[in-house]
Image (cartoon, helix red, strand yellow):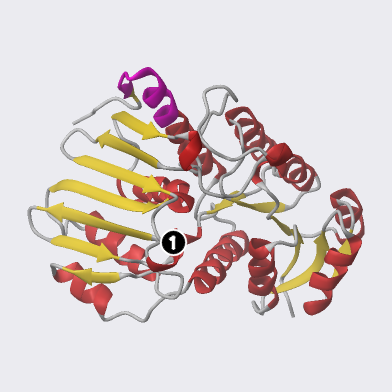
Amino acid sequence: MAELKAAVVGTGGAARLHAAAYARDGRVRLAGVVSRSRTRAEELAGEFGARGYCSVEEMLRAERPDAVTVATLEWEHEQPVLEALAAGAHVLCEKPLAHTLGAGERMVAAAARAGRGLGVNFNYRSVPAHGVIKEALERGGFGRVGLFAAQMHAYLWPHMLDQMRGWFGDPVEVTAAMVDEQGLRPPVSTGPGGRPWLYSEEDGSEMLYHPSVAAAATFGYGEFVATMSGSALVPLERNFWSFGLYGSEDALAVDRATRANLNGTASLGRVAERIAGMQACSYEESFALSVAGFVDAILAGKPVPVTGEDGLAQMRLDAAIVEVARTGRAKRITEDTE
């Protein structure tokens, strides 16, 4: 018998993956799906034996779920997250946590008041190969780290910021630069009112999210340096991301992670040999693993794997990148305690 009742807010691609993950987890019963379109809600819900609803309030009142995924567009995250937390549900929110820092702060505060878990679906933290890297870092397998360098498609920018934080924590200092020329803007996803979700000083954007042409940031970690670069011109289906991690005792290069194989092609050292021998983890599988980790934490009464505080820290780091790119001045993030 299922131990948790879950619901999903949203009916897009990510929402479908969350619904499928809940539905195939024997510990969970998917009870409801919410969309502004009743047809869309009922169609997705019907695939998994759930009920469709047109409002979050109606679903929460009728189903009283233990867990709610919010998989709407990021500028539509705040209200359903707040409503679900107030109703006593644990919440797994799609990334990024919110479209403004203020919204993210309100969501984190609401989770604390409610005493419920607020998770952020940075699903690539759940890729087993990434767990191998974290374990090697924690046991000192790389020795003294000197450099981490990553490049990726723009869509993966917030993910890699979070992944970097998951491996190394917050940097001490950041510098950044970006190019966003009107004539070179590709047709990427849009924000409220059809406005492109791109860096623009005029629209008051707090976070970068989708760098259109080129963005790069350098992070000082006291004893080592990390760099990230992203662009919508990177061929997404052939290269989600590539990165290198270089230490005094081991080195790792991961090339061309793809939707079918998020491990990428690993080379250079001992950790690479371990990753090369692992089964490929797909985009869809990363969602299932992330949702399962969220469910594990709820059932065990433990903190969720990627917390609302983690999501807010990622947003603040992204906002710092935008700030320093605009001002041309490096920004202190944390104090160096070395």
Name which residue lies at 32% across and 36% down. Answer: 217
- Position of residue 43 relative to residue 168, above or below, is below
Q: Which residues are magenta?
A: 320-331
Q: Is residue 172 left or right of residue 285?
A: left
Q: Badge 1, how many Cα within 10 Å: few under 14, some, many 20+?
A: some
* The image quarter in which residue 243 lies: bottom left
Residue 66 belongs to magenta span: no
Q: Is residue 133 above or below residue 104?
A: below
Q: Position of residue 198 (x, y in %)?
A: 53, 38
| Mark 1 residue element | helix
Residue 234 lies in quadrant: bottom left
In the rendered image, residue 83, in percent from the top left (x then y), is placed at 79, 43
Q: Amino acid at mark 1?
A: Leu
> What residue sits right under mark 1 in the picture?
236
Q: Is residue 86 or residue 241 the one in the foreground?
A: 241
Place of residue 203 in the rendered image (x, y in percent of width and height, measured from the top left)? 60, 25
Asked whether the viewer can see residue 208, the reply is no
Q: Residue at x 63, y 72 (%)?
A: 21
Quarter of the image that includes the C terminus: top left
238 relative position to 24: left or right? left
- Magenta residues, dominant SS class: helix
Horizontal side of residue 169 vs 25, given as left or right: left
Depth check: give the residue in front, 112 or 57: 57
Classify the position of the N terminus by image quarter: bottom right
Residue 175: percent from left, percent from top: 30, 28
Q: State whether residue 140 appears in this view.
A: yes
